[in-house]
Image (cartoon, grey):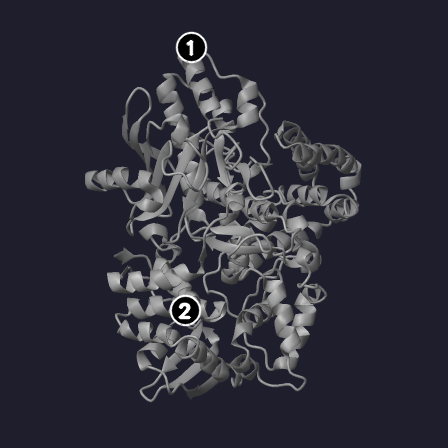
Amino acid sequence: MNCSANEVMMLAAKAARGAGAPPAQAARFGVAAAAHLMAGRDDGVLGRALAALPKGAIIELPLAINCIEERAEQGRACGALHGFERSLVQSYVSTLPYTAALNDDDILRIDLTKPAQRTPVQRIDLCDEIYLGWAALAARILVPESAASRQSGAGAGLSDND
Amino acid sequence: MKNFIAPLPQMPLRPPEEVMRLSRLGSMFPTRLSFLRCLIRRLSDEQAQVSQHVWQMCDNGFGHAVFSIDLGGFTYSLVAVSTDLPAELRTDRAIATAWDSAYVLFDGIPDADDITRIVKNAPLQEAGRFGPRDLVLSRANKSVRLFDHVTQALRAGRQPDAELIRDIGYLMRTTAVYGNGKFGIADRASYDTRPGLGGPFAAEMLTVWLIRHFTHALAEHVGRGTLDRETKRHLGVGNSTGLGMAPFLVTHPVLLNNWMMARETALARVCAVTHLTEAQIARLGVLAARASAHLAQWTVSDNAHQARIELLGEDWANAVAVLTPQALAREMPVCAAMQSVRKMSKDVQELMAALLIEPFGDLVDGLADSMADPFGAYAPCLPDTEALRAQIKQSFGWALDVDYAQKDNCGQFWYVSEAKMEPRLGQRFEEDGALMETPLDIARRVQAAYADLPDTAERVSGFLARHPDHALAVERVTLAATYPYAEIRDNLISQKCLPVDMLRCKLSFFGASKFDPKSDRWTRINLCQGAPLADELNWDADDWWLPVFAA
């Protein structure tokens, strides 16, 4: 299915929440997942990250990046991002709002004083397997509407032929 | 030597603890910074022209049409599909599967294949799939009462009844205006650097304005006559808005901050005006009187809200009584006017704020450029947990004293519905589903994080390693240090939380008027009422704040 980046980002975030990630980490995974697929990286990494929840990269990678941010002096810092699948690290790094570069040894250098350059957004071809898998995880946080809710939604309680 | 532009003088901003309360957000009025106003100014500056490319409609008004407009060097087209909808299928509810009309804002001028695709897909709405040249997807139902009356009147060779035009104010009302990638349409990021589409919801507002143009054309086609210009101008686009819109303000804290900051800065700037010209004094008088007339024409069916409007009308009469030419000729007159209503209702205060901003386009219109969020939510991390504690006390002190174990303080929960994947609000102690709660309970989360802070200072990352569930709270507190208006300062899961207040805040930024709440969870509104028509963009196009029907 040919999707917008925002569709993929939202779906991935909901899938992460459904798989047990807290909301902030799930949202960050959604952004990284869209960037990952836009960059044509191995989509299996995303599945493995989701499967590892409530532990693993989705929880620990943002924290590792935060640790490097905390050490910044005059806006600059560097630190290692070892122990994660490299392509996933690349995707998380590519979505940071400030200038950041990952070298071949997985050392991240950041400059908080310089905003990142915007990456042009691209369409994403999401294969059925990923789409269905993520949709199934996302469905875990959906709630059947109650009768009370249906009776109080927009348009409720009126004739709309007015 | 560098040349620096001196910042414009301004009074202190109203503090977030005053501005960001739900009850005040629920009293907001559109201003000249509202997105529709910004769009119309832009269209007017460019003297944009709407052209009709396709009009394939049967005599009864069913078929499709394409209207195009140039903006910022790009061409955009509204593809409108009008369908013969049986009365029993007509509903504004989210459960609807068919509508009187469906729309796509297309990037460029659609060819025959594009039109065929859109005519097939647009009526399906959420069940359809769309592509990267489809920028916005929308649908609207007729106000059957007014549409039938208008077309019958035109066929009889007369103009429609002025009272009905005034009381209803639109021929159709939209029930959704989807943007930013929904159902496969284009990502906002793919066009938000284009001139004219960089502002928040600019593409959506362009769509709504073009839908309004279409509804006029459709009524005139079916009625085989021409509406008076004044009548047509007063016919906006209605909208039914429910809970689906409310969480946006919580999930986009930087955007909310930027909207509120622009509005509050505008107010602070006009309050710093030391003396008014005679023309400005006269203008304020005209606008104050227009506001009074607008209030008199704003009638709703809900008794409680009608009483609120009537009370506002009475209070407004007292408020503007002090805006005499003599008073406005004194020093710091705008600030004095704002001060004069400080003890009056929030409705009066917010109406006065909107009024006082209105005549000062030269001071405030540039602020519209700061209302988007091109960089995303980011704020430098706090150095340690003691700094986090201090920031919580400063920005979320209001959230710390609430006992969230009390039923009244946590009686509602937000969730995403299984049927429509739309935000909903449930009763925590009466309905299932709270385990899947959507995290709009920011206040409760911040309090929980605060309670878990260690006695001894440590890095925030160390704290989060032990408490990953507090990451959202920490993120919001960190943002609050940089974005003071990012947070609604009320408990959004309280039994007393009225989502309609959130709707009014957001809709006022769109430029909506004539709020017509049908419950505490959904409202009807009017968009584009009084706005220039397609052939009036070279006219004094920006003067339509709180429109009044003169007929």
Residue type, mark 1 in image:
Ala
Residue at disc 2, secondary structure: loop
Please state the horizontal and vertical placement of residue B374, each as a whole percent of the image: 45, 61
Determine the chain carrying the residue at label 1.
B
Please state the horizontal and vertical placement of residue A14, each as a whole percent of the image: 41, 63
Check disc 2: other Cα within 10 Å, few if <14, some if 14-19, many if 20+. many
Q: Is residue B202 left or right of residue B250?
A: left
Q: CA distance from mark 2 to mark 1?
A: 63 Å
Residue B473 circle label: none
In the image, residue B5 sits, relative to residue B202, either above or below, namely below
In the image, residue B93 sits, relative to residue B408, either above or below, namely above
Q: Nearer the viewer, residue A113 or A121?
A: A121
- Determine which quarter of the picture holds residue B476: bottom right
Q: Nearer the viewer, residue B374 or B153?
A: B153
Q: Nearer the viewer, residue B428 or B394?
A: B428
Where is the N terminus of chain A found, in terms of image quarters?
bottom left
Residue at x 26% of width, y 74% of height: A42
Residue type, mark 2 in image:
Ala
Residue at x 56% of width, y 46% of height: B503
Please state the horizontal and vertical placement of residue B517, each as a whole percent of the image: 59, 38
State the residue position of label 1.
B156
In the image, residue B457 sits, relative to residue B501, either above or below, namely below
Determine the chain carrying the residue at label 2.
A
Check disc 1: other Cα within 10 Å, few if <14, some if 14-19, many if 20+. few
Nearer mark to the viewer, of 2 and 1: 2
- Circle 2/circle 1 CB separation < 8 Å: no
The image shows a total of numbered marks equal to 2
In the image, residue A60 sits, relative to residue B525, either above or below, namely below
Residue at disc 1, secondary structure: loop
Residue at x 33% of width, y 72% of height: A46
Can residue B149 be seen in the rendering of this structure?
Answer: yes
State the residue position of label 2.
A19
